[in-house]
Amino acid sequence: MKGILGRKLGMTTIYKDGKAFGVTVVKAGPCTVVQKKTSEGGEYDAIQVGFEELTPERAKKILTKPLVKKFEAVKVKPHRVLKEFKVGNINDFNVGDIIEAGVFSEGEKVDVTGFSKGRGFSGAMKRWNFRGGEASHGSKFHRELGSVGNHTDPAKIWKGKKMPGQYGNEKKTVKNLTIVKVDAENGLLAIYGAVPGARGGLLVIKSANR
């Protein structure tokens, strides 16, 4: 299984073979292998990779002391983000190896995971796409939730009732997206379609065929 971390840069249009593709541009990698985990210990084969390299001074300010010591122990420069990927053959990787955007190829299918845009505390119409009441004068019921209570039995509001509350900022995965273009020199991936999150959001990109 192939995987890499990246940041969403935005969307644009790419013309290829006389067709227009709306793509999301992602700054993918470089990622450094920080740790190897083997199935011998009763777990599974996986690698832990770091993304967005930090200076030692910056690392001491934003990372915990155990993390800083971990990077020092494996002789790898500290990174802002750590992520684990399961792999088929753990022997294909070594601590310190660099994973770049060129690990993917054009036409390859990928799954992209990120956090959707946070919209804060939202009303029921925005959060759940409720129709609402009439917009005409005299209605007195426009953007309200409506009745939510019950009678004497059960005399409560059931858990899971669609009501106003926190909307967005949830972990989402969009599957089977196609990579239209790979710019290995600049570490860019152009992925056909939209991916979760706002510009600058962290993304996890994995091969769909695993």
Image: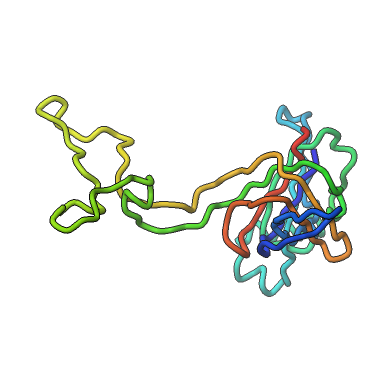
**Would you say 207 lies left or right of 89 here?**
left
The image quadrant that residue 23 belongs to is: bottom right
Looking at the image, which residue is at 72% across and 27% down? 42
The image shows residue 39 at horizontal and vertical percentages of 77, 30
On screen, residue 15 above or below 105: below
Residue extending farthest left: 152
Instruction: Name the residue: 84% across, 50% down.
Output: 95
Q: Nearer the viewer, residue 87 or 180?
A: 180
Q: Quadrant of the C terminus?
A: top right
Marker count (numbered): 0
Residue 51 appears anywhere in the view: yes
Q: Is residue 156 above or below residue 197?
A: above
Q: Residue furthest bottom?
A: 57
Relative height, residue 16 to residue 38 (above, below): below
| Left or right of 172, for residue 2 | right
Q: What residue is at 74 percent from the left and 62 percent from the top? A: 27
Q: Position of residue 177 (x, y in %)?
A: 71, 44
| Residue 180 pos. (x, y %) | 80, 51
* Viewer-proximal residue among 126 and 32: 126
Instruction: Tell whether 205 sits left or right of 138.
Output: right
**Residue at 24%, 55% in the rendered image:** 135
Seen from the viewer's position, the closer of residues 185 and 135 is 135
Image quadrant occupied by the N terminus = top right
For residue 59, which quarter of the picture?
A: bottom right
Q: Is residue 97 visible?
A: no
Nearer to the camera, 30 or 168: 168
- Type of colouring: rainbow
